[in-house]
Image (spheres, coloured by chain):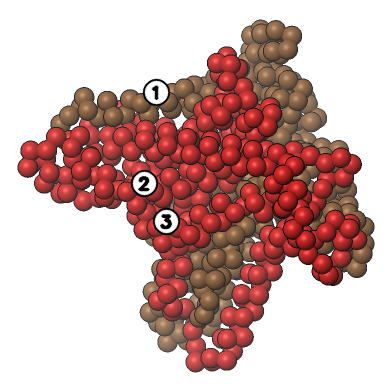
Chain colours: A red, B brown
Amino acid sequence: MTGRQRAIEAGAGFAGARRAWGGWGPFRGPHHDQSRVRDVVVLAALAFYASPIAWQLVTSLRPDADLMESGVGITRLTGAHYVNVATASPLPRALGNSAGIAVVTTAVAILLGVAGAYALARLRVPGRRAIMLGVVMGTAFPAIATVAPLYLIVRALGLRDTWAAVVLAHTSFALPLALWLLAGFIRELPREMEEAALVDGASPTAALRYVILPAIAPGAAAAAVITFLASWNEFLFAYTFTATEASRTVPVALALFPGVFEVPWGDLAAAAVLASVPPIAIVFGLQRHLVRGLLGGAVKE
Amino acid sequence: MIRTRGLGLVLLAPALAALAVVTAYPAFSVIALSLERRVPVFQIETFVGLANYRFLLGDPAFWSAVRVTALFTVVSVLLEVVTGVALALAVNGQRRWRAAAVGLLLLPWCVPGVVAARAFEWLLHPTSGLVNALLGGRAINWLGEPGLALGSVVVADAWRTMPFVALIALARLAAIPVSVHEAAAVDGAGRIAAFRTITLPLLVPVLLVAALFRTLDALRVFDLPFVLTGGGPASTTETLTLYAYRSLFQTLQLGFGAAVATVVFALVIATAWLYSVVLEREERRR
């Protein structure tokens, strides 16, 4: 899934969640008991829908002997798979690589993005419309189209199997995404805010620094979170530009998870659970922050 | 507009420079590459014009990938839109635990694609998988049987991305004022009539946007089929993106692979254009 989808979806989803506090529904009738049953059924259906993730969690806690037996009967639980993954698998290294690559990608995209988006949204720039169109198109480019030229660049620079290679490739989708989101946030701000500062004699740089930056901080944080997640989850570039454990990211480590004869399903499930913890923690922990940041820029009706 | 042309350029220059290198140059370069015969391991690098595209016209693997891509895209997007709208309607009618419902929808969406792929690989495991166990201990090879593999990949992809459609539809539904439904009820409209004449027309524009993003993603999907089946068995799940990747990095024909990748690129741009025309017409109608 692309970061742009994430942006829109996060906004949309949280809009729905926020309205839920208000708690009205169009089909609300006088039949209270009926509606309770209905609500339970819907929630149960959604729990079933999320069950593939729950099954990964269960699998990660069952001993190997039980896993191969097949079946649903859960009799014993063990933490052995997590010990294996932590002590004898490429995952800890991959978690570090993913975190490092995602943080650097996010920093580059947000730093260049804030400055560029301010110029695109507020300052006079020749060819602004064409640049904006290019940015929007850039968010839709398929990775398969850009991967071969990026591969040749990475090879020419001697960067294969380094963090820098993956950061370079991830910037190709993270920067258009950040520019697009941030330009949206800045355009939503009332122009009077900076004009007042400018009338008072502040320079445009000072207006950016003391007026715009604080105002878009929540939006920038949301854009940073989305960029981070997109980089954390990305597979095609990371798989292509890495060759050893020195730079392999989490999705690559999961795709290449080592096994002797059969895939070690319990260890793999534990690794998958650990790989999912950061995105799940971020999405659920920062819901409110994301709502405020994203409703302005990402979902416009 | 603030009259400081110089400052705008100064602030934009770093982003533009970076975009030129990592986005714009690769986008043009892949087209140039597709006109070459380029095999780096043998230091082959010759301009061949449209020869790669001419070869594609008679290449059965290419046409098989076109069929798989079309089937995968149409079926998974339809499945996602229909189930997504149904779920959005169900959650929108929730009186309690709506935040929990949205949370459960967010889960499949936020985990990495490779995690989703590995979860389904394990669920569908021929001898130890939960799906076969629930079917009474049958030994169905969901991902290894040519007749079943594409269906399995479609289901896994729809599972991962349907929440996107559902959440967008839900946001739109929640924005429909309750008075609209009350007015319909006063006029004696039944639930089905109300859905057809009120809710659905209001949903169409956001569903078109959701379908656009989903179609673009289905056309370029890589992680899920690559990890689940690698394009197999017997190429029955090899999409254009997988075929391009195999040509680029497994058989190492950069020029030929770039031609397949350019086809994907063209499809993505054509799809975006098509939807924008439909959306504009939709907007003018109201």
Disc 1 to disc 3: CB gap under 8 Å: no
Distance between mark 2 and mark 3 Cα atoms: 10 Å
Image vertical order of residue A95 relative to residue A153, above or below: below
Identify the residue at horizontal 42%, vertical 56% (top origin): A290
- Does residue A45 show up? yes
Mark linked to residue B274: none
Which label sits in the foreground, 2 or 1? 2
In screen coordinates, is A247 left or right of A141?
Answer: right
Q: Position of residue B93 (x, y in %)?
A: 52, 77
Identify the residue at horizontal 62%, vertical 62% (top origin): B82
Q: Which residue is mark 1?
A: B17
Distance between mark 1 and mark 3 Cα atoms: 29 Å
Say what amino acid the circle numbered 1 marks.
Ala
Q: Position of residue B125 (x, y in %)?
A: 84, 54
Where disc 2 sits, the SS reads helix
Q: Quadrant of residue B257?
A: top right
Instruction: Please rate how many residues cluster around mark 3, counting C-alpha atoms within 10 Å: few if below 14, some from 14 to 19, many from 20.
Output: many
Q: Which residue is mark 3?
A: A290
Q: Quadrant of residue A300?
A: bottom left
Where disc 1 sits, the SS reads helix
In screen coordinates, is A117 left or right of B191?
Answer: left
Image vertical order of residue A36 relative to residue B67, above or below: below
- Point out the image quarter for the N terminus of chain B: top left
Mark linked to residue A220: 2
Q: Nearer the viewer, residue B192 or A97?
A: A97
Image vertical order of residue B105 relative to residue A96, above or below: below
Q: Position of residue B277 (x, y in %)?
A: 47, 45
